[in-house]
Image (cartoon, rainbow, N blue to C red):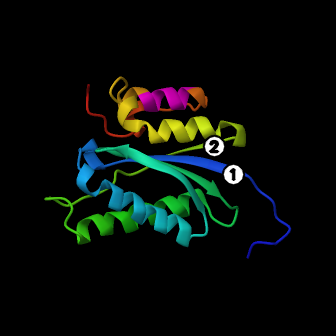
Amino acid sequence: MELKSTSSQIYIQIVFAVKGRQSLILTKWEEDLYKYITGIVQNKDQKLLAINGMPDHIHILIGMKPSCTVSDLVREIKKSSNDFINDNGFCSRKFEWQEGYGAFSYSHSALDNIIGYINNQKEHHKVKSFKKEYHLILNKFEIEFDEKYLFEWIED
């Protein structure tokens, strides 16, 4: 139980991809998916600030309370949204998210920029691939990585 005297300001961008980086998230139902994920986040008593993506991956910005862990929240988002997509027959084949995710923290002063970045995903990816974008984020946050443990990439 969270104490009333607890104060926090935690902003996390979460990024994850469709298994095999298949372009399965279609425009005709992506808004339903985003609303569903928003509901999951709100039901976990967290605040969704932005959500958007491409047919093969999504970005979510969440204002998190310390009562919830990122790993538990992502596990619930991926499991429940995976079931939602399959139960509604949105894909002609079985839909699955890839293993793993990226989680990156931001300061309050960076919120406008990161929200704009997430909201502009479609325009952003006209000039920059997901692989290039993800590598830039990892480098910006000075996160060491081994390419073999990152998402499955579709070569550009």
Does label 2 or label 1 sit earlier along the sequence? 1
User: At 46% from the left edge and 50% from the top edge, which residue is drawn?
Assistant: 51
Which quadrant does the C terminus fall into? Answer: top left
Q: Which residues are magenta?
A: 133-139
Q: Secondary structure at mark 2?
A: strand
Residue 41 shown in magenta = no
- x, y (%) of residue 50? 51, 50
Taking the image as drawn, is residue 63 in sight? yes
Residue type, label 1: Ile
User: At 59% from the left edge and 34% from the top edge, which residue is drawn?
Assistant: 113
Identify residue for label 2: 105
* Left or right of residue 148: residue 14: right
* Left or right of residue 147: residue 60: right
Q: Who is closer to the viewer here, 144 or 32?
A: 32
Q: Are marks 2 and 1 in contact (CB under 8 Å)?
A: yes
- For this orientation, the residue located farthest to the left is 92
Identify residue for label 1: 10
Q: Quadrant of residue 112?
A: top right
Callout 2: few (<14), some (14-19), or many (20+) C-alpha neighbours within 10 Å?
A: some
Number of callouts? 2
- x, y (%) of residue 96? 29, 57
- The kind of secondary structure the magenta stretch mainly shows is helix
Taking the image as drawn, is residue 101 in sight? no
Callout 1: few (<14), some (14-19), or many (20+) C-alpha neighbours within 10 Å?
A: some
Q: Is residue 36 above or below residue 104?
A: below
Q: Secondary structure at mark 1?
A: strand
Q: Who is closer to the viewer here, 104 or 127?
A: 127
